[in-house]
Image (cartoon, rainbow, N blue to C red):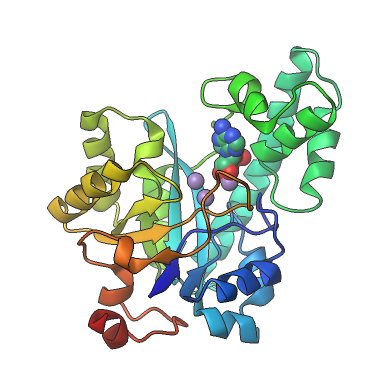
Amino acid sequence: MIVDFHTHSSASDGALAPSDLLLKAKAEGVSCFAITDHDTLAGYLSVKSSQAARDVGLISGVELSCRWAKTTIHVVGLDFDDTAAQMVEMVESLSASRVERAKTIAERLEKVGFSGALDGALKAANGSQIGRPHFAQWLVEAQHVTSLTEAFDKYLGAGKIGDVKAFWPAMADVVSGITAAGGIAVLAHPLKYRLTGMKLRALLNDFKTAGGECLEILNGRQPEPDMKRLSQMAESLNLLVSAGSDFHRSFEYGPTLGIDTDRLTAGRYLWCERALTGCVESTLDAKAR
Ligand code: AMP
Ligand code: MN
Ligand code: MN
Ligand code: MN
Protein backbone atom coordinates (compact mmCIF):
# COMPACT_ATOMS: atom_id res chain seq x y z
CA MET A 1 0.00 0.00 0.00
CA ILE A 2 1.30 3.45 -0.91
CA VAL A 3 0.41 6.36 1.41
CA ASP A 4 1.59 9.93 1.95
CA PHE A 5 0.48 12.03 4.90
CA HIS A 6 2.77 15.05 4.44
CA THR A 7 3.01 17.00 1.16
CA HIS A 8 2.98 20.63 -0.02
CA SER A 9 1.26 22.33 -2.95
CA SER A 10 1.65 25.79 -4.48
CA ALA A 11 -0.87 27.02 -1.90
CA SER A 12 2.16 27.23 0.42
CA ASP A 13 5.77 26.56 -0.59
CA GLY A 14 5.32 23.60 -2.93
CA ALA A 15 5.88 23.82 -6.68
CA LEU A 16 2.85 21.90 -7.97
CA ALA A 17 -0.71 23.18 -8.14
CA PRO A 18 -2.96 21.09 -5.85
CA SER A 19 -4.57 19.33 -8.84
CA ASP A 20 -1.14 18.44 -10.28
CA LEU A 21 -0.05 17.14 -6.88
CA LEU A 22 -3.05 14.79 -6.91
CA LEU A 23 -2.17 13.61 -10.42
CA LYS A 24 1.36 12.88 -9.27
CA ALA A 25 0.02 10.98 -6.25
CA LYS A 26 -2.22 8.97 -8.54
CA ALA A 27 0.70 8.16 -10.84
CA GLU A 28 2.63 6.91 -7.80
CA GLY A 29 -0.26 4.61 -6.85
CA VAL A 30 -1.16 6.41 -3.62
CA SER A 31 -4.38 5.21 -1.95
CA CYS A 32 -4.39 7.45 1.12
CA PHE A 33 -3.13 11.01 0.78
CA ALA A 34 -2.94 14.37 2.53
CA ILE A 35 -1.99 17.83 1.27
CA THR A 36 -0.48 19.47 4.33
CA ASP A 37 0.34 23.04 3.32
CA HIS A 38 1.85 25.41 5.87
CA ASP A 39 -0.96 27.13 7.80
CA THR A 40 -3.51 27.05 4.99
CA LEU A 41 -6.32 24.78 3.80
CA ALA A 42 -6.67 26.59 0.47
CA GLY A 43 -4.93 23.93 -1.63
CA TYR A 44 -6.80 21.05 -0.04
CA LEU A 45 -10.16 22.83 -0.25
CA SER A 46 -9.68 23.65 -3.93
CA VAL A 47 -9.45 19.96 -4.90
CA LYS A 48 -11.21 17.99 -2.17
CA SER A 49 -14.35 17.34 -4.21
CA SER A 50 -12.58 16.27 -7.39
CA GLN A 51 -12.45 12.78 -8.90
CA ALA A 52 -8.65 12.82 -8.49
CA ALA A 53 -9.13 13.39 -4.74
CA ARG A 54 -11.32 10.27 -4.54
CA ASP A 55 -8.81 8.31 -6.64
CA VAL A 56 -5.94 8.95 -4.21
CA GLY A 57 -8.03 8.79 -1.01
CA LEU A 58 -7.53 12.44 -0.09
CA ILE A 59 -8.15 13.26 3.58
CA SER A 60 -8.02 16.74 5.13
CA GLY A 61 -4.59 17.99 6.13
CA VAL A 62 -2.50 20.98 7.19
CA GLU A 63 0.95 21.63 8.71
CA LEU A 64 0.66 24.17 11.51
CA SER A 65 3.49 26.34 12.84
CA CYS A 66 3.75 26.66 16.60
CA ARG A 67 6.28 27.08 19.37
CA TRP A 68 7.38 24.93 22.25
CA ALA A 69 9.96 26.29 24.65
CA LYS A 70 12.06 28.43 22.26
CA THR A 71 11.71 26.07 19.32
CA THR A 72 9.48 26.35 16.26
CA ILE A 73 7.56 23.09 15.96
CA HIS A 74 5.42 21.80 13.10
CA VAL A 75 2.27 19.87 13.94
CA VAL A 76 0.43 18.16 11.10
CA GLY A 77 -3.35 17.99 11.47
CA LEU A 78 -5.13 15.16 9.67
CA ASP A 79 -8.70 14.06 9.06
CA PHE A 80 -10.36 17.04 10.77
CA ASP A 81 -13.65 18.75 9.95
CA ASP A 82 -12.51 21.51 7.59
CA THR A 83 -15.54 23.64 8.50
CA ALA A 84 -14.94 23.48 12.29
CA ALA A 85 -14.68 27.00 13.72
CA GLN A 86 -11.57 26.09 15.76
CA MET A 87 -9.69 25.01 12.64
CA VAL A 88 -10.91 27.84 10.41
CA GLU A 89 -10.04 30.49 13.02
CA MET A 90 -6.64 28.96 13.78
CA VAL A 91 -5.63 28.91 10.13
CA GLU A 92 -6.91 32.47 9.58
CA SER A 93 -4.94 33.70 12.54
CA LEU A 94 -1.79 31.87 11.41
CA SER A 95 -2.13 33.34 7.90
CA ALA A 96 -2.35 36.83 9.38
CA SER A 97 0.68 36.07 11.56
CA ARG A 98 2.63 35.00 8.50
CA VAL A 99 1.99 38.36 6.83
CA GLU A 100 3.15 40.24 9.97
CA ARG A 101 6.16 37.95 10.27
CA ALA A 102 7.06 38.55 6.63
CA LYS A 103 7.18 42.30 7.37
CA THR A 104 9.57 41.67 10.26
CA ILE A 105 11.76 39.37 8.17
CA ALA A 106 11.89 42.07 5.47
CA GLU A 107 12.84 44.77 8.02
CA ARG A 108 15.65 42.61 9.26
CA LEU A 109 16.90 41.91 5.75
CA GLU A 110 16.75 45.66 4.99
CA LYS A 111 19.02 46.25 7.97
CA VAL A 112 21.72 44.10 6.42
CA GLY A 113 21.39 45.98 3.15
CA PHE A 114 18.79 44.06 1.12
CA SER A 115 16.09 46.52 0.17
CA GLY A 116 12.82 45.50 -1.44
CA ALA A 117 12.65 42.14 0.34
CA LEU A 118 8.94 42.29 1.19
CA ASP A 119 7.83 43.14 -2.34
CA GLY A 120 10.21 40.53 -3.71
CA ALA A 121 9.00 37.76 -1.42
CA LEU A 122 5.34 38.65 -1.98
CA LYS A 123 5.93 38.44 -5.70
CA ALA A 124 7.64 35.06 -5.31
CA ALA A 125 4.73 33.83 -3.18
CA ASN A 126 2.30 34.92 -5.91
CA GLY A 127 -0.73 34.90 -3.61
CA SER A 128 0.17 31.72 -1.73
CA GLN A 129 0.91 31.44 1.99
CA ILE A 130 4.10 33.47 2.44
CA GLY A 131 7.11 31.90 4.13
CA ARG A 132 10.88 31.92 4.32
CA PRO A 133 11.24 29.92 1.07
CA HIS A 134 9.78 32.91 -0.80
CA PHE A 135 12.39 35.21 0.74
CA ALA A 136 15.01 32.65 -0.26
CA GLN A 137 13.69 32.66 -3.82
CA TRP A 138 13.86 36.46 -3.94
CA LEU A 139 17.40 36.53 -2.49
CA VAL A 140 18.47 34.23 -5.34
CA GLU A 141 16.59 36.22 -8.00
CA ALA A 142 18.07 39.49 -6.72
CA GLN A 143 21.50 37.81 -6.90
CA HIS A 144 22.26 38.38 -3.22
CA VAL A 145 23.00 34.64 -2.95
CA THR A 146 23.56 31.93 -5.54
CA SER A 147 21.25 29.21 -4.16
CA LEU A 148 18.29 28.60 -1.86
CA THR A 149 20.60 26.62 0.41
CA GLU A 150 22.93 29.61 0.70
CA ALA A 151 19.94 31.85 1.47
CA PHE A 152 18.94 29.62 4.39
CA ASP A 153 22.52 29.04 5.55
CA LYS A 154 23.33 32.75 5.67
CA TYR A 155 20.08 34.60 6.33
CA LEU A 156 16.97 32.51 6.91
CA GLY A 157 17.88 29.27 8.66
CA ALA A 158 17.65 28.52 12.38
CA GLY A 159 19.34 31.23 14.42
CA LYS A 160 19.93 33.57 11.44
CA ILE A 161 18.45 37.07 11.18
CA GLY A 162 15.49 35.98 9.08
CA ASP A 163 14.47 33.21 11.47
CA VAL A 164 11.56 35.06 13.06
CA LYS A 165 9.43 32.84 15.30
CA ALA A 166 7.75 35.22 17.73
CA PHE A 167 4.49 34.99 15.84
CA TRP A 168 3.55 31.37 16.40
CA PRO A 169 0.99 30.13 18.96
CA ALA A 170 1.90 27.64 21.68
CA MET A 171 2.07 23.99 20.59
CA ALA A 172 -0.56 22.94 23.14
CA ASP A 173 -3.08 25.40 21.64
CA VAL A 174 -2.48 24.14 18.12
CA VAL A 175 -2.85 20.52 19.21
CA SER A 176 -6.12 21.28 21.00
CA GLY A 177 -7.38 23.21 17.96
CA ILE A 178 -6.83 20.15 15.77
CA THR A 179 -8.48 17.74 18.20
CA ALA A 180 -11.39 20.14 18.78
CA ALA A 181 -11.97 19.98 15.01
CA GLY A 182 -12.13 16.17 15.28
CA GLY A 183 -8.67 15.68 13.78
CA ILE A 184 -5.51 13.82 14.68
CA ALA A 185 -2.45 15.85 15.69
CA VAL A 186 0.83 14.47 14.33
CA LEU A 187 4.19 15.73 15.57
CA ALA A 188 6.05 16.32 12.29
CA HIS A 189 9.74 15.41 11.73
CA PRO A 190 10.63 15.14 15.45
CA LEU A 191 14.36 14.86 14.78
CA LYS A 192 14.56 18.02 12.68
CA TYR A 193 14.37 20.28 15.72
CA ARG A 194 17.87 19.21 16.78
CA LEU A 195 16.85 18.80 20.42
CA THR A 196 18.87 16.84 22.96
CA GLY A 197 17.47 13.43 23.89
CA MET A 198 16.13 14.84 27.14
CA LYS A 199 14.43 17.82 25.49
CA LEU A 200 12.94 15.59 22.80
CA ARG A 201 11.38 13.37 25.44
CA ALA A 202 10.02 16.46 27.19
CA LEU A 203 8.55 17.66 23.87
CA LEU A 204 6.88 14.30 23.25
CA ASN A 205 5.46 14.22 26.76
CA ASP A 206 4.04 17.74 26.41
CA PHE A 207 2.69 16.88 22.96
CA LYS A 208 0.90 13.83 24.33
CA THR A 209 -0.40 15.71 27.38
CA ALA A 210 -1.86 18.36 25.03
CA GLY A 211 -3.81 15.63 23.20
CA GLY A 212 -1.32 14.75 20.45
CA GLU A 213 -1.91 11.20 19.25
CA CYS A 214 0.55 10.47 16.49
CA LEU A 215 4.26 10.68 15.66
CA GLU A 216 5.75 11.04 12.17
CA ILE A 217 8.35 8.26 12.08
CA LEU A 218 9.33 8.79 8.44
CA ASN A 219 9.77 12.22 6.85
CA GLY A 220 11.23 12.43 3.35
CA ARG A 221 14.79 11.22 2.94
CA GLN A 222 15.75 10.76 6.55
CA PRO A 223 18.76 8.73 7.74
CA GLU A 224 18.03 5.01 7.99
CA PRO A 225 18.36 4.55 11.80
CA ASP A 226 16.00 7.43 12.60
CA MET A 227 12.80 5.52 11.90
CA LYS A 228 13.69 2.81 14.37
CA ARG A 229 14.45 5.36 17.06
CA LEU A 230 11.18 7.18 16.42
CA SER A 231 9.15 3.95 16.30
CA GLN A 232 10.50 3.05 19.72
CA MET A 233 9.59 6.46 21.08
CA ALA A 234 6.08 6.17 19.67
CA GLU A 235 5.71 2.72 21.16
CA SER A 236 6.87 3.78 24.61
CA LEU A 237 4.35 6.63 24.64
CA ASN A 238 1.64 4.56 22.99
CA LEU A 239 1.36 7.00 20.09
CA LEU A 240 0.12 6.13 16.61
CA VAL A 241 2.64 6.50 13.79
CA SER A 242 2.42 8.38 10.49
CA ALA A 243 4.71 8.79 7.47
CA GLY A 244 5.08 11.36 4.73
CA SER A 245 7.45 12.45 1.98
CA ASP A 246 7.23 16.19 2.86
CA PHE A 247 7.29 16.57 -0.92
CA HIS A 248 7.68 20.20 -2.11
CA ARG A 249 9.06 19.68 -5.62
CA SER A 250 11.03 17.17 -7.66
CA PHE A 251 14.78 17.60 -7.52
CA GLU A 252 17.73 15.28 -7.83
CA TYR A 253 18.35 14.53 -4.17
CA GLY A 254 14.84 15.26 -2.96
CA PRO A 255 12.28 12.82 -1.59
CA THR A 256 9.91 11.10 -3.99
CA LEU A 257 6.20 11.35 -3.39
CA GLY A 258 4.51 8.29 -1.85
CA ILE A 259 5.64 5.91 0.88
CA ASP A 260 5.43 2.15 0.42
CA THR A 261 4.19 0.94 3.80
CA ASP A 262 6.40 -2.16 3.45
CA ARG A 263 9.30 0.19 4.21
CA LEU A 264 7.97 1.05 7.64
CA THR A 265 9.09 -0.66 10.80
CA ALA A 266 6.50 -1.96 13.21
CA GLY A 267 4.16 0.56 14.74
CA ARG A 268 0.51 1.30 15.36
CA TYR A 269 -0.15 2.76 11.92
CA LEU A 270 -2.57 5.65 11.92
CA TRP A 271 -4.30 4.37 8.76
CA CYS A 272 -4.81 0.91 10.27
CA GLU A 273 -6.10 2.04 13.65
CA ARG A 274 -8.44 4.75 12.37
CA ALA A 275 -10.95 4.70 9.55
CA LEU A 276 -9.79 7.90 7.82
CA THR A 277 -12.50 9.85 5.99
CA GLY A 278 -11.89 9.57 2.26
CA CYS A 279 -9.04 7.05 2.46
CA VAL A 280 -9.51 4.60 -0.41
CA GLU A 281 -8.43 1.48 1.49
CA SER A 282 -10.73 0.51 4.32
CA THR A 283 -9.22 -0.05 7.75
CA LEU A 284 -9.69 -3.80 7.36
CA ASP A 285 -8.05 -3.90 3.92
CA ALA A 286 -5.10 -1.94 5.22
CA LYS A 287 -4.72 -4.30 8.16
CA ALA A 288 -4.73 -7.32 5.89
CA ARG A 289 -1.65 -6.05 4.06
P1 AMP B 1 8.53 28.91 7.19
O1 AMP B 1 7.36 27.98 7.28
O2 AMP B 1 8.21 30.19 6.53
O3 AMP B 1 9.22 29.09 8.52
O4 AMP B 1 9.59 28.21 6.24
C1 AMP B 1 10.00 26.91 6.52
C2 AMP B 1 10.13 26.11 5.24
O5 AMP B 1 11.36 26.48 4.61
C3 AMP B 1 10.23 24.62 5.47
O6 AMP B 1 8.96 24.03 5.47
C4 AMP B 1 11.02 24.17 4.26
O7 AMP B 1 10.16 23.96 3.17
C5 AMP B 1 11.91 25.35 3.94
N1 AMP B 1 13.28 25.21 4.45
C6 AMP B 1 13.67 25.20 5.73
N2 AMP B 1 15.02 25.09 5.82
C7 AMP B 1 15.48 25.04 4.56
C8 AMP B 1 16.78 24.93 3.97
N3 AMP B 1 17.88 24.87 4.73
N4 AMP B 1 16.88 24.91 2.63
C9 AMP B 1 15.77 24.99 1.87
N5 AMP B 1 14.50 25.09 2.36
C10 AMP B 1 14.37 25.11 3.67
MN1 MN C 1 7.95 23.89 3.53
MN1 MN D 1 7.83 21.05 8.52
MN1 MN E 1 6.26 20.04 5.54
Residue at 30% x, 81% y is 286
Quadrant of the rendered image containing residue 177: bottom left
Residue 181 makes an appearance in the image: no
User: In terms of depth relative to the viewer, which is nearer, 141 or 61?
Assistant: 141
Q: Quadrant of residue 7?
A: bottom right
**Image-based side of 159 in relation to 96, left or right:** left
Q: Position of residue 81 (x, y in %)?
A: 49, 74
What percent of the width, then of the height, locates residue 54?
Answer: 55, 85
Q: Quadrant of ligand 1?
A: top right
- Residue at 69 percent of width and 28 percent of height: 104
Of all residues, the one furthest to the top in this rendering is 112
| 43 up-or-down from 138: above or below | below
Q: Residue at x 37, y 56 (%)?
A: 186
Q: Is residue 280 above or below residue 264?
A: below
| Horizontal and vertical percent position of residue 60 | 51, 71
User: In the displayed structure, does residue 175 sit left or right of residue 238?
Assistant: right
Image quadrant for the N terminus?
bottom left
Q: Taking 110 as reference, is 56 above or below it?
A: below
Picture quadrant of residue 41: bottom right
Q: For this rendering, which residue is in front, 123 or 173? A: 123
- Give the total number of marks visible in the rendering: 0
Extreme residue in the left direction: 236
Point out residue 226 in the picture as x, y percentages from the top left corner. Answer: 29, 43
Q: Is any atom of residue 87 visible in this view? A: yes
Q: Residue at x 72, y 64 (%)?
A: 17
Please state, as top left, top right, bottom left or bottom right, where the C terminus lies in the image: bottom left
